[in-house]
Image (cartoon, coloured by chain):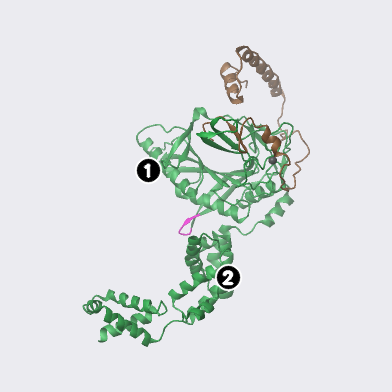
């Protein structure tokens, strides 16, 4: 038996107005390269970093939301390395005294169970620039071929690094833990959680223990994982690679690997011997950061209800199954919409069915959010009323719902306009069935020979003729009567 | 505990600082570093038992900046310092990308 031990390091970009230590705008995604740069973030001699207040507030909020203890005094340090994405030659980070320690998250792993994942530390640091490696075909202004291009717009953007304890025991749990951290950061509005835009990045450490002999593999680090799917895939791949090596009695090298999109495997980035030495030392240009008790209280008051609490409340107050609560809460807007609707209808499960089923499907097809759709709570209230009074059938209701989302029309108006009232006139249904029996005598014979499943053919025929307006239950009973009578 | 200042360590420091020294410079630097560390060693003689650690020599607490985003007025002068450019990118000789 093998046991997996996984820890995560997550870098989250804080949604601040400016960069961490200068006034350059922080939201530069899609901007022309090297437009959001200044002497501070390009490391010009004689410049001094000044920490932004929103950077502090958002990182403290993150720490509180992840149940951490915020240090009264934390300090900034320099992490030294030479790479062109970092013109200063060092990154400002918090190495010796991080902003916060000892937190935890509760990750829902299904069937009402939660895993307790401890957070070791959270610290503030600045991002580096972006490098693009070009092919030999590109030519520079001075006529040189090939090269590396550097855009420093990102350089100096504030990040929080969140480091978990190695409490995670499977690749799936790693993915769920990451999603849960993303949801929390989104809820409290400190990070967009957008992995495609690099606002959230993840490194994972994995080692495997052979429980028979207690032997543990070396730790392997998988870097630069930029999607939730790849977190799971890269760790699955590593688990297989490491356990295979252990079975074969081979040594698992302590190294840093990266997920390779093309081969769908992990590949070596650098071995232990090549491991850098960052020579951390205190940043002399920044005094210690003091977080007072009253400031903490102030920030605590800004924290909204967190996803985990909200899921519990939805299950308790609305008697929803865990799955419904999780899906609704995973989208803050959607959960707000749900609560608004339930306030009027008091029928949480039915509302949840419409939102987590039809609505999410339609939104996904059209690549929209709830807010971008035309749907308002009154639409659902009206729709439920039409169903209650048996004015419309469920299949017509689904059609109407889709129009509400797209066009924002009131369901009862759509019914009026299009004449979608349910056909409960048995005569109309009867004539539809008689027609179907005439069209397909073979089906009639089959039914009478004992193949009762053919009944669905006749119900289908009625639905087609009435354009879905018939009540399928009525159609079924009428069809049965006619087929058995004649 | 006194670290051993040998040639391997000097070469490692060269590599980390991305400089290359001549042989005589290396010898001079080895001696320098030894002297500096010897001096620092004398701090070990001070009894610090029960004394609270000094976090920073700066007694003023951090003053934060109100975050009002503003584009720097003269980004062109920064771009002008780039040894080579491509559009507005800083352009460098090809680097094997691993970070
Ligand atoms: Zn700047």
Instruction: Assign the C terminus of chain A to one quadrant of the image.
Output: bottom left
Q: Do the residues labelled 1 and 2 touch (CB within 8 Å)?
A: no
Query: Hey, which quadrant is residue A448 in on the image?
Result: bottom left
**The one of A400 and A173 positioned closer to us in this rendering:** A400
Q: Is mark 1 on a helix, strand or loop?
A: loop
Question: Which residue in the structure is indicated by mark 2?
Answer: A376
Q: Give the range drawn in magenta.
A: A108-112
Q: In which quarter of the image is ligand 1?
A: top right
Q: Which chain carries label 1?
A: A
Instruction: Determine the CA span between mark 1 and mark 2.
Output: 53 Å
- The spot of residue A41 in percent (x, y) is 68, 38
- The spot of residue A33 in percent (x, y) is 62, 41
Q: Residue placed at 62% from the left, 44% from the top?
A: A32
In the picture, one chain is brown; tell me its letter: B
**The one of A238 and A337 positioned closer to us in this rendering:** A337
How dense is the environment of label 1, judged by Cα within 10 Å: few (below 14), some, or many (20 and up)? Answer: few
- The spot of residue A469 in percent (x, y) is 42, 79
The image shows residue B23, relative to residue A105, as above or below, that is above
Q: Chain A is drawn in which colour?
A: green
Magenta residues: mostly which secondary structure? strand
Q: Residue A1 carries which label?
A: 1
A445 left or right of B78? Answer: left
Residue A87 showing in the rendered view: yes
A264 left or right of A359? Answer: left
């Amino acid at each position: 038996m093998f046991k997996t031990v996984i820890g995560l390091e997550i870098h989250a970009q804080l949604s601040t107005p400016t960069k961490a230590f200068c006034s350059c705008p922080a939201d530069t995604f899609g901007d022309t390269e090297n437009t959001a740069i200044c002497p501070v973030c390009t490391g010009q001699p004689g410049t001094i970093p000044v920490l932004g207040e929103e950077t502090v507030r958002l990182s403290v909020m993150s720490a509180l939301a992840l149940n951490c203890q915020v240090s009264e005094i934390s300090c900034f340090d320099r992490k030294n390395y030479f790479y062109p994405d970092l013109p200063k030659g060092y990154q400002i980070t918090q190495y010796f005294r991080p902003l916060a320690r000892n937190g935890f998250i509760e990750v829902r792993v299904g069937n009402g169970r939660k895993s307790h994942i401890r957070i070791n530390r959270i610290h503030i640091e600045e991002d580096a620039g972006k490098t693009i490696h070009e092919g030999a075909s590109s030519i520079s202004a001075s006529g040189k071929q090939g090269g590396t291009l550097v855009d420093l717009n990102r350089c100096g953007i504030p990040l929080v690094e969140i480091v978990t304890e190695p409490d995670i025991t499977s690749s799936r749990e790693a993915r769920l833990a990451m999603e849960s951290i993303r949801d929390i950061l989104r809820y409290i509005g400190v990070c967009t959680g957008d992995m495609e835009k690099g606002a959230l990045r993840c490194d994972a450490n994995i080692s495997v223990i052979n429980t028979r002999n207690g032997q543990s593999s070396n730790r392997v680090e998988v870097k630069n994982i930029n999607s939730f799917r790849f977190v799971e895939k890269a760790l699955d791949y590593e688990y297989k690679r490491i356990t295979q090596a252990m079975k074969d009695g081979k040594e698992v090298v302590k190294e840093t690997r990266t997920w390779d999109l093309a081969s769908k495997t992990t590949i070596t980035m650098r071995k232990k011997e090549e491991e850098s030495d960052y020579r951390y030392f205190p940043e002399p240009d920044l005094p210690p950061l003091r977080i007072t008790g009253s400031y903490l209280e102030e920030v605590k008051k800004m924290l909204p209800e967190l996803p985990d609490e909200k899921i519990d409340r939805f299950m308790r107050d609305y008697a929803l199954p865990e799955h419904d609560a999780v899906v609704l809460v995973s989208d803050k807007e959607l959960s707000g919409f749900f609560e608004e609707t339930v306030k009027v209808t008091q029928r949480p499960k039915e509302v949840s069915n419409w939102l987590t089923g039809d609505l999410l499907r339609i939104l996904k097809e059209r690549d929209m959010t709830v807010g971008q759709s035309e749907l308002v709570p009154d639409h659902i209230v009206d729709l439920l009323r039409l169903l209650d009074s048996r004015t419309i059938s469920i299949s017509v209701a689904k059609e109407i719902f889709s129009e509400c989302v797209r066009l924002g029309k009131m369901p009862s108006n759509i019914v009026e306009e299009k004449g979608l009232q349910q056909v409960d006139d048995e005569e109309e249904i009867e004539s539809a069935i008689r027609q179907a029996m005439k069209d397909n005598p073979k089906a009639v014979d089959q039914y009478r020979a004992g193949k009762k499943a053919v009944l669905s053919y006749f119900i289908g025929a009625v639905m087609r003729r009435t354009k879905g307006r018939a009540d399928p239950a009525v159609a079924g009973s009428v069809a049965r009567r006619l087929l058995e009578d004649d | 505990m006194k670290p051993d200042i040998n040639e391997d360590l000097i070469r490692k420091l060269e590599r980390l600082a991305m400089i290359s020294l001549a042989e005589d410079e290396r010898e001079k630097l080895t001696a320098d570093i030894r002297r500096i560390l010897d001096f620092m060693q004398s701090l070990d003689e001070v009894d610090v038992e029960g004394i609270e650690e000094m976090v920073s020599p700066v007694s003023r607490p951090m003053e934060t900046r109100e975050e009002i985003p503003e584009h720097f007025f003269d980004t062109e002068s920064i771009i002008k310092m780039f040894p080579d450019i491509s559009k507005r990118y800083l352009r460098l000789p090809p680097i094997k990308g691993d970070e």
